[in-house]
């Protein structure tokens, strides 16, 4: 069953952020690298915070995704193309 946390942004290069919570191992690197975008819940799994207006800038969000050891964070552009991890 898909267990995803998703947020949509209406500006910038990154427009959609998805955390695959089935893949997440609770390493917390994302929430350290991009603390205004990712948070860890009481199941020790990452989720995307609810308010996109308070997110980190795109460069920082990218660093958060890159920090994930299991590539559980997927980023998409305006056209819906996956920009991280590269397909
Ligand atoms: S870095 Fe990856 S594995 Fe670690 S909490 Fe974030 S999404 Fe989960």
Image (spheres, rainbow, N blue to C red):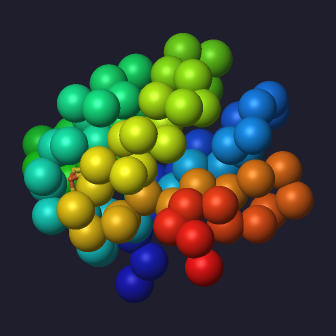
Residue 50 shows in this picture: no
Instruction: Specify the quadrant that holds the N terminus.
Output: bottom left
- Residue 63 in percent (x, y) is at 41, 40
The residue lying toward the viewer, choosing from 48 and 14, is: 14
Vertical comparison of 65 with 22: above or below: above
Write down the quadrant of residue 11 in the picture.
top right
Write down the quadrant of residue 53 in the picture.
top right
Numbered marks: total: 0
The answer to whether residue 84 is left or right of residue 35 is right
- Residue at image position (36%, 29%) is 34
User: In the orientation shown, which residue stands out farthest toward the top?
Assistant: 54
Instruction: Specify the quadrant that holds the C terminus.
Output: bottom right
- Residue 13 in percent (x, y) is at 75, 40
- Residue at image position (49%, 42%) is 62
- Residue at image position (42%, 58%) is 73
- Residue at image position (59%, 32%) is 58
The answer to whether residue 49 is left or right of residue 43 is right
The answer to whether residue 63 is left or right of residue 15 is left
Residue 76 shows in this picture: yes
- Residue 52 in percent (x, y) is at 60, 26
Vertical comparison of 57 with 24: above or below: above
Vertical comparison of 2 with 81: above or below: below
User: In the orientation shown, which residue stands out farthest toward the right?
Assistant: 79
- Residue 50 in percent (x, y) is at 50, 30
User: In the orientation shown, which residue stands out farthest toward the bottom?
Assistant: 1
């Amino acid at each position: 069953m898909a267990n995803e946390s998703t947020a949509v942004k209406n500006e910038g290069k990154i427009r959609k952020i998805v955390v695959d919570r089935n893949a997440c191992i609770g390493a917390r690197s994302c929430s350290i690298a991009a603390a205004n975008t990712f948070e860890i819940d009481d199941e020790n799994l990452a989720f995307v915070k609810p308010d996109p207006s308070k997110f980190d800038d795109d460069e920082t969000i990218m660093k958060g995704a890159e920090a994930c050891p299991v590539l559980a964070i997927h980023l998409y552009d305006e056209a819906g193309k996956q920009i991280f991890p590269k397909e």
